[in-house]
Image: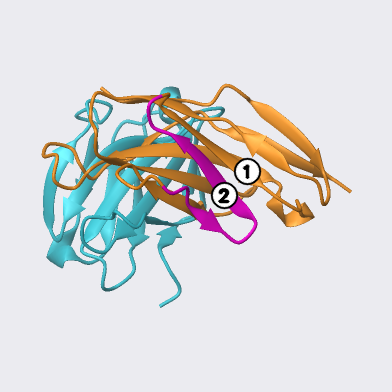
Chain colours: A cyan, B orange
Amino acid sequence: DTGVSQNPRHKITKRGQNVTFRCDPISEHNRLYWYRQTLGQGPEFLTYFQNEAQLEKSRLLSDRFSAERPKGSFSTLEIQRTEQGDSAMYLCASSLGTGVDGYTFGSGTRLTVV
Amino acid sequence: AQTVTQSQPEMSVQEAETVTLSCTYDTSESDYYLFWYKQPPSRQMILVIRQEAYKQQNATENRFSVNFQKAAKSFSLKISDSQLGDAAMYFCAYRRSWNSGGSNYKLTFGKGTLLTVNP
């Protein structure tokens, strides 16, 4: 297991298009998190899964955003009708148990909406 | 809500010297976890060091150590014998204790400090 994998690394899309990102966590990790990082800011929490259950969504996650984690394995984050304000780095992380030892982060997907 | 403040947007250090990055946080809780993460350019965020608030002893990981001042709500990171590979963005993060209920799994990050290491 080589860690948390995110695809694609970069995505350029036109405003109004839909995009989907994928995250493959460390296989034995039961918790998965999505964060968004804009330029000059620290990552901001978006949503969290414990196994396949999505347990919390930040108010940052508008109704254009949806995340899934079927079968408690990989996760997808979809943004519909993208806006320029959605341009950011989308980070995925996973942890075993409560994550008190810290998360393992992926390298992120950088989204540019033009 | 908890907040994390990193007051130094940028810092620089000479190779082999020591540098300290500052972090303060605001919380009404007594039990929590603090982390320092390193994010090299275009690479993934890596955990550098963690501190449990109920432990008085400052955490140390090789050249990295923290100065945890619970009453002052301060959590600074000291990097000794700085190396070129230490150049990165450093983020301080807060997490509620696992037994505090509510959103005790998400990290709250500061805005980061960009560390430059000069040869």
Q: Residue at x 22, y 25 (%)?
A: A59
CB within 8 Å, label 2 to label 1: yes
Q: Residue furthest bottom?
A: A1
Helix, strand or loop status at disc 2 = strand
Q: Is residue B62 magenta?
A: yes
In this rendering, position of residue A109 left or right of residue A21 = right
Q: Residue at x 28, y 35 (%)?
A: A80
> What amino acid type should be assigned to the residue bearing mark 2?
Ser
Residue range in magenta is B57-71
> What amino acid type should be assigned to the residue bearing mark 1?
Lys
Query: Would you name the residue on which mark 2 appears?
Result: B65
Report in which chain the residue with disc 2 lies. Answer: B
Q: Residue at x 23, y 29 (%)?
A: B29
Instruction: Name the quarter where the N terminus of chain B is drawn.
Output: top left
Q: Is residue A39 magenta?
A: no
Counting other residues with Cα less than 10 Å from the Cα at mark 1, is it few (<14), some (14-19), or many (20 or more)? some
